[in-house]
Image (cartoon, rainbow, N blue to C red):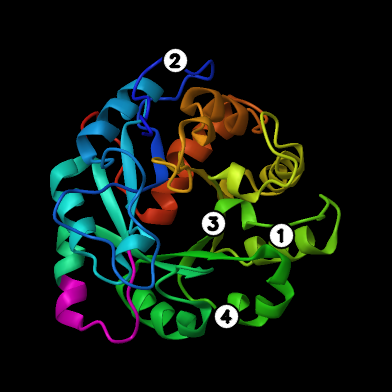
Amino acid sequence: MLTRPLSGRKPAIGLPEGAVDTQMHAYLPGYPSLPGGPPLPAGALPDPEQYRQVMIWLGISRVIVTQGNAHQRDNANLLACLEAFGSAARGVAAFGAEMSDAELDRMGEAGVVGARIMDLPGGAVSLDELDAVDARVADRGWMLAVQFDGNRIFDHLDRLSAIRSRWVLDHHGKFFAGASPDGPELAAVKRLIDRGNCWFKFAGVYESSKEGGPDYRDVAAISRAIARHAPDRIVWGTNWPHNLARSQDAYPDDAALTDTVLGWLDDEAALRRTLIDNPQELYRLPPYRGVGL
């Protein structure tokens, strides 16, 4: 039985008030997994109340709740979680061209500010639908979260370069196996960022690293290079509740993971940009006033 720690030693890196976790999932009872996606996370259902304890533990003030793959394109659980979180949260949903304007309006009123593209097994919306989803999102001023196998970035460059919306490359570019900070893959990412509407997300490093923890040296080298190139385009997420962890020994220490990943930033100014200024711009969040969003 997997038990998620919800408190413990504080991270050595103190998060500034107003810090935004831009990548996490939450689940409520009554929303089963759907065909095509993975099962619900192992252990007790990781719900908003549990995550609120993690927020206190790590020093998180605001959160972006991302639609979990288990629920595919049924965003009912996401909307229920946004209601449970209240003003501290906004959401990123999964939908294709089939979604009606009325439903998008309803989701926007509930706090949805973006759409998810996940071109990996179990993902609900692939890159084949990117153009159609981007059109819907751009018209509303929402953002896109895009995840795919980074080793195939050259297969997708034309399509990624044509994105109209603000968008974020998820999970450290995911699976840049063998890529180096001065290699062609990173040069391509930098060109995308330099277009002005692309961000890069530090989240789920254990899913992307081939060398593994605790240092994740391969992903660290890539992430540091991008952070130095574009400190105003980095955002961060806990990736809680670490859905791929199916056993206790595979579950990361959230405080240690926070210190490791945020330690790749150069200074306090970069930390503040990553945790406050950059996510506010990407997700169009209002300035933090001390309570919620």
Q: CA distance from mark 2 to mark 3?
A: 26 Å
- The quarter of the picture where residue 114 lies is bottom left
Taking the magenta stretch, the answer to whether it contains residue 236 is no
Q: Which residue is under mark 1?
A: 190
For marks 2 and 4, the one nearer the N-term is 2
Three-letter amino acid code at the position of disc 1: Lys
Q: Nearer the viewer, residue 32 or 98?
A: 32
Left or right? Give the position of 98 relative to 84: right
Q: Judge whether 284 appears above or below 239 on screen.
A: below
Q: Which residue is under mark 3?
A: 170
Q: Which residue is under mark 4?
A: 162
Q: Nearer the viewer, mark 3 or mark 1?
A: 3
- Magenta-drawn segment: 93-105
Crowding near pointer 1: few (<14 within 10 Å), some, many (20+)?
some
Q: Nearer the viewer, mark 2 or mark 1?
A: 2
Crowding near pointer 4: few (<14 within 10 Å), some, many (20+)?
few
